Amino acid sequence: MERIKQALDKARSQKQNPAYGAPSMLRNEGPKAEENITYTETSVVSMHPESLHEKRVVAVDENDPATAAYKVLRTQVLQRMRVNKWNSLAITSPTEGCGKTLTALNLAICLAREVNHTVLLVDMDLRRPKLHTYFPTTSGLGISDYLLNDVELNSVLINPGIERLVILPGHKVFSSSSETLSSPKMVELVEELKNRYPSRIVLFDLPPVLACDDVIAFAPYVDAALLVVEDGTTQESELKRAVELLDSINILGTVLNKSTDRAAAHYY
């Protein structure tokens, strides 16, 4: 863990961009959300908590020790986003297999439990979408259907039976994913998702930084990024390179996933 921290600190210290850390989006209104929400157009897909827990969506269980760690992560994320008046966060990792999607999902659930805001979790991993595997729907629709087939957005959004949380899942795989992420229709969609509700926090589950150029292409449209690394697997060189490639975006912090150190409580 110390090795990873030192690598991140070293990479950060090498940045020469004076605008690094400046808020990219200012919002005039503070978080305000209705405590009781009725979903009339968004499909409600209620999953049994035990079924989700078996898939390592631990935040559905308040008694799971890992849930406490995600709550700490939630508080840290909220504090930093509120100070900078941000509302959009990309979640990525240096390489595949670090657990970024599960981290995004567990964090989204914990964020949604706070009554001051709503949460929208978007599957922007267009090469390997995974969120739809946790909440299968009868329609099987995803963001690709909205982008390619002009399907109404309300037909794609789902509520997983958790109040104040809405998910925009993926579906089909895009071979030209980076071009799609910077396309006019995608940019218009992202701006709509970020700005429609002043109390909304938007999380984007993005591909690994070193796997493709998708994160770099999408970076201008988010306020900050959260890096998920895998304990004992992520190499110092991989982490350093990922931070260098994310030079244009505010890195909110790092999450140490799959930690064997119980004292670390699964987060860093």
Image (cartoon, rainbow, N blue to C red):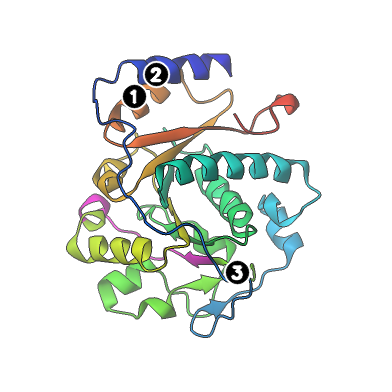
Q: In which quarter of the image is the N terminus?
A: top right
Task: Indicate whether 186 appears above or below 17.
Answer: below
x, y percent for residue 202? 44, 57
Picture residue at 54% right of the left edge, 75% below the top = 137
Three-letter amino acid code at the position of disc 2: Ser
Q: Is residue 176 magenta?
A: yes
Q: Name the residue under label 1.
A: 241
Looking at the image, which residue is at 42% across and 48% down? 89
Which numbered dot is residue 160? 3
The answer to whether residue 219 is left or right of residue 264 is: left
Task: Decide if residue 27 is on the left or right side of residue 64.
Answer: left
Give the number of marks. 3
Q: What residue type is labelled 3?
A: Pro
Q: What element carries label 3?
A: loop
Q: Name the residue under label 2.
A: 237
234 on left or right of 245: right
Tell me residue 222's x, y (percent).
33, 48
Bin the neighbour count of mark 1 within 10 Å (Cα to Cα): few under 14, some 14-19, many 20 and up.
some
Dot placed on the residue nearer the N-terminal end, 3 or 1: 3
Q: Is residue 212 above or below residue 190?
A: above
